[in-house]
Amino acid sequence: MYNLFVSHSWAYSDAYDKLVRLLKAKSGFDYRDYSVPKNDPIHHANNDYQLKQAIRAQMQHASCVLVLAGVYSTYSKWINIEVELAKEMHKTIIAVEPWAAERTSQFVKTNADYIVGWNTDSIVNAIRKC
């Protein structure tokens, strides 16, 4: 059983949904999702400090952090904070490059332990190294 945190932008939550579907479809691969998806936000955070602490609490259970590395990630305040939290907590970071993307986030790739393409086996193989 792998404990995962998927860092993603709520504005691009369809990419998160597609990634989760890929992982669920993988035979013999079990995981728990500690992410903060758009349909299950952290409601008790009243300000940025509390939100950061709530994300830290969620992330602490994860064995690794997957970051959707679309170019939008470079400009997302919260994705950048989640990457920084993952580094502080010594979590393995896996950058997942969107399928057929011509541009991806250099910030995410620079901070990643593994960079994988949008391929179920590549993603799962990287997770198994956590």
Image (cartoon, rainbow, N blue to C red):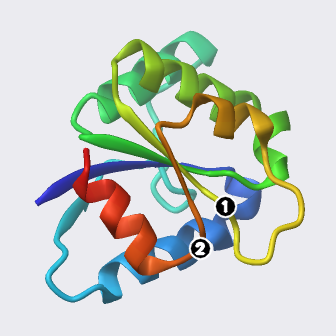
Residue 109 sits in which quadrant? Answer: top right
Task: From the top left corner, tell me how far across and down residue 94 is, in percent.
Answer: 48, 47
In this rendering, the answer to whether 39 lies above or below 94 is below
Residue appearing at x 65%, y 64% in the figure: 13
Task: From the top left corner, tell me how far across and down residue 73 is, in percent.
Answer: 75, 43
* Disc on res. 118: 2
Pick the front one: 64 or 50: 64
Task: From the top left corner, tell me how far across and down residue 19 is, in percent.
Answer: 51, 72
Amino acid residing under circle 2: Trp
Mark 1 surroundings: few (<14), some (14-19) or many (≥20) residues within 10 A: many
Residue appearing at x 57%, y 66% in the figure: 16
Mark 2 surroundings: few (<14), some (14-19) or many (≥20) residues within 10 A: some
Q: Given the current orientation, which residue lies at the most extreme right position?
A: 102
Q: Secondary structure at mark 2?
A: loop
Amino acid residing under circle 1: Glu
Residue appearing at x 76%, y 55% in the figure: 70
Q: Could you tell me which quadrant the N terminus lies in?
A: bottom left
Q: Is residue 122 left or right of residue 17?
A: left
From mark 1 to mark 2, how far is it between C-alphas? 6 Å
* Disc on res. 64: none
In this rendering, the answer to whether 109 lies above or below 52 is below
Q: Secondary structure at mark 1?
A: loop
Q: Could you tell me which quadrant the C terminus lies in?
A: top left
Residue appearing at x 59%, y 73% in the figure: 118
Residue 68 sits in which quadrant? Answer: bottom right
Q: Are marks 1 and 2 in contact (CB under 8 Å)?
A: yes
The number of numbered badges drawn on the structure is: 2
Say whether disc 1 or disc 2 marks the residue closer to the N-terminus: 1
Task: From the top left corner, tell me how far across and down residue 87 is, in percent.
Answer: 46, 20
* Disc on res. 97: 1
